[in-house]
Image: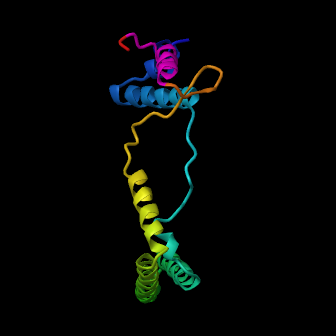
Amino acid sequence: MKLPERITEEEAWRQATDADTMWEAMAEWIRRLAKKILGTSRRSGNKMKGAWWWNMEVKEKVKEKKETYAAFMNRGTDEEKEISRVRYKATKKIAKKAIAIAKSKAYNRLYQKLESKEGEKEIFKLARVRERRTRDLGVVRCIKDEIVRCCLRMQKSMEVAKVLFHTPQW
């Protein structure tokens, strides 16, 4: 069944009383259909940027800051809230300082390493990683066909896309 036919087979969006609810129902149906047809990619989870310089001290300080923030948000009376706000601000300041120190030490180690003989290879590795991060994400690496096989060749991918999306202009 072609994509336009699958979109029109859903009757829930047609039963909406106003344009906004119809639009929301139609958009939700298209999202579900696209997820079913195309699948989803796995994300790497809750990775923090710049975590390579973190150490146990920073981890503990940030955890303590999060705990004091939770305590600050869960306080009931104004007096308790003010006391916990002051504690939170103090732990936040301590955590920021620990982060700055850890970052500074890590970057100093990195710069010393890059200045050495082995550092030449590291520079090229860093440049390659940076280039990969800036690549265009619009590049399609593969399209899955009906049997959920990944079509790597461009010609085969175009044929599968024509079948799935029924787009004669290609």
Picture coordinates of residue 26 (x, y %)?
Answer: 43, 25
Whether residue 131 is visible, yes or no, is yes
Left or right? Give the position of 167 relative to 70.
left
Q: Nearer the viewer, residue 101 or 77?
A: 101
Quarter of the image where one finds residue 13? top left
Q: Give how far across and how far down residue 19 sits, in percent.
A: 34, 25
* Picture quadrant of residue 92: bottom left
- Between 121 and 90, the residue placed more toward the observer is 121
Residue 161 inside the magenta-drawn segment: yes
Residue furthest toward the front?
A: 117
Is 127 part of what is drawn in magenta?
A: no
Name the foreground residue: 131 vs 158. 131
Q: Residue at x 41, y 31 (%)?
A: 24
Q: Where is residue 156 drawn, in percent x and y? A: 52, 19
Snapshot colouring: rainbow
Q: Nearer the viewer, residue 128 or 151?
A: 128
Q: Which quarter of the rendering shows the C terminus? A: top left
Q: Is residue 148 left or right of residue 57?
A: right
The answer to whether any part of residue 7 appears in the image is no
Residue appearing at x 52%, y 75% in the figure: 70
Quarter of the image where the N terminus is located: top right
Which residues, given as a range, are shown in magenta? 154-168
Q: Main secondary structure of the magenta part?
A: helix
